[in-house]
Image (cartoon, helix red, strand yellow):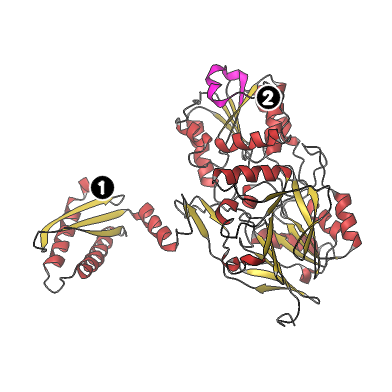
Amino acid sequence: MINNPKQPQLKIIPLGGSSMVNKNMFVYECGKDIVIVDCGIGFPESEQLGVDVVIPDINYLKNKLDKIRGIVITHGHEDHFGALPYLLKDLGNPPIFASKLVRGLIQVKLEEFNLLKGAQINQIDPEDNSFSLGQFEFTPFRVNHSVPDSLGFFIRTPLGNLVHVSDFKFDWTPVDGKFFDVAKLVKLTSQAPVRCLLSDCLGATSRGYTKSERFIQHSFEHELDRAPGQIFISTVSSNISRIQQAINAALKYGRKVAFLGLSIERNAEVAQNLGYLKIPPGTIVNSRTVHKYADNQLLIIIAGSYGQENSALSRLAEGSHRLISLKPGAVVVFSADPIPGVYDQVGRVIDKLTEKGARVVYSEIQENLHVSGHGSQGDLSLLAALVRPNHFVPIGGNPRHMRAYTNLIAKMNFDKNKILELSSGDGIVITPNQIKVKKLISLSNIFVDGSQVGDVGAVVLRDRQILSEEGIFVIIVKKDKNGKFKKSVNIVSRGFVYMAISEQLIKKAEKLVQEVIEDKKTSSWNSVRTRIEKRIADFLYRKTQRNPMVVVVLVD
C-alpha cells in the first residue's frame, strides 16, 4: 500500500502550484534527500494591488532544510530562477546548479540583492556526464527554448528513472546553432525504462510544431527597413537569442545599438562576456550618449515588454525617461507575448505610446513578432514518443493545457489513466509498485511588496481593493486637555465623493459622530471608535450605495 511507512517512497511536489504557467518550483524527496528543481517567481493578478511579484510557498521545507542537497535550474527565465534572492537564505543557502549562461544571470540577480557572497553556484556542462545530489543522479541534456543554454534532466532515483523537461521545443535552426540533444536523450531512455515524464504542456492547445526562433529575424529586418527614424525593440531581458537577432538586424541596416533598462543592460553584458552574444566592436553605444546620434543611426533595445511600472519602456511612454524622448513617427516593436496578469498594463503602455505619435507593432496586429519557446502538439508528441515513459505529468500550464496534453497523449495509444493531472497542493507519490497523485500540502500565495516578503496578506489586499474602488472616509475626533471629547469633528474624504458637492452628506455625518461622542454610555475610546465606524458606514451606504473605508482617528 502507498501509505505503508516502511515502503520506500519518492515524492514530487510543486511548491509553486501545479496549474499555472509561472512560479515554477519542484521538490524531489526520497528518504533523507531533497533536491529542488527551479525556483521561479510568479506575476500578480490585477486585483493583487501593489504586489511586485509572487513567490513559491516553502513552508513544507522549513523543517527539512538539512535534507536539501541542492537547487537545479533548468533555464534562464525569471519564472524559473527569479525567486532565488527571496528564498535562498530561508532554504539554508544550498548549492545551486545551472548551465553557463544561467549561472551568469543568477550571479547578476544575487549580486543585485547583495547575496552573491557565500552563494555556491555550480556550472552544469550538458556535454559532460552526470552529477549526484544525495540519492539523485542528474544527467543533463540540451533542449531548445527562447533562451540559450536550456536543459532537460534524466534523473536516476532509488525508485526508478524520471525525465524532467520544463520549457522546450524542437528547433532545427536555433539562433545559437545548438540543437535539442535527441541522440543523448534516446540513449539515456533506451538504457533503462522511464517511470515518469514531467513535460511542459503550455503548447498543448496549438497544432503542428512551434516555429524556429529564426523567423523573428525577418520581422525585425522588415521593421528596420520601414523605419525612417527612431526604432525601439522591447523583449524579455533574458531572451538572449531575441537580443542577438535584433543586433543582427541593426548591423544589416547600418545602425548602432543601445540598451535602455538596467535588467537588459546587465543580462546583455553577461551574455556578451560569456560568448552568447556575438557583437562586433563599435556596435554598442552607451545609453548616456544616445542623444549624440541621429534617429536613423540607432536601434534601441529597451526593457519593459510586460509593461512593468517604472521600466524603461513605461517611462518612455510617460515622457519621463531622462535619456531619451519619443518622437512622432517612432516605431516601437513588442517582441514578447504578454503573459497572464500583465495584459492590462501592456495595453496601457501601447495606448500611451500611440497617443505620443508612435507606430506600435505588437502580436495582435502583426504575426511573427514573437515565436513561442514552448512546444506545440507536434513537439509534445515527439518528446513523448522519444521517452515512452510509463506515466506522464503535464507541468507549466493551466488546467486547460493539462487537459489538452492528456487528450493528445491518449491519442498516441498511451494509457489515459497513467497521465496524471495535478491540482494545487497535489504531489506525485512513487513506490516500487505504483505511481499515484495525492494531496500532500496546502499552498498559499507569498507576495513580495517592495522589500517586504510575505507580509502582504488577504486583509491588506482587501483593504487596497476597497481603497481603489470605494475610497476612504476619515473622521478626526479630538479630546481637550481634560480628556473629554470635543464636539467639533473634522472629516476628510478621498476617492469617495467630491467634497464640494456633498456638503449635506458631510454635515449629516458630523452630526452622527457628535451624537455618539455625547452619549455618556460609551466613554472608552475603543467603544466610541467602533460605534462611529459602524454608524457612519451604514449611513454612507444608505445614501450612496458605496462602502468606503471608514477610519476614525483620535487626536489628543
Q: Is residue 554 left or right of residue 235?
A: left
Nearest to viewer (mark 2 / mark 1):
2
- At 58% from the left and 43% from the top, the residue drawn is 111
User: In what element is the residue under mark 1?
Assistant: loop
Q: CA distance from mark 2 to mark 1?
A: 53 Å
Residue 281 to residue 26: above or below:
above
- At 70% from the left and 81% from the top, the residue drawn is 3
Q: Is residue 513 left or right of residue 13?
A: left
Q: Which residues are magenta?
A: 284-299
Q: Quadrant of the N terminus?
A: bottom right
Q: Quadrant of the C terminus?
A: bottom left
Residue 36 seen in the current view: no
Q: Which residue is mark 1?
A: 498
**Nearer to the camera, 441 or 304:** 441
Which quadrant would residue 223 be assigned to in this image?
Answer: top right
In reply to whether residue 255 is colored magenta, the answer given is no
| Crowd band around label 1 with a 10 angstrom C-alpha radius: few (<14), some (14–19), many (20+) | few
Q: Is residue 37 left or right of residue 160?
A: left
Residue 264: x and y in percent read 60, 36
In reply to whether residue 292 is colored magenta, the answer given is yes
Residue 42: x and y in percent read 57, 53
Residue 553 seen in the current view: yes
Decide which of tag 2 and tag 1 comes sooner along the chain: 2
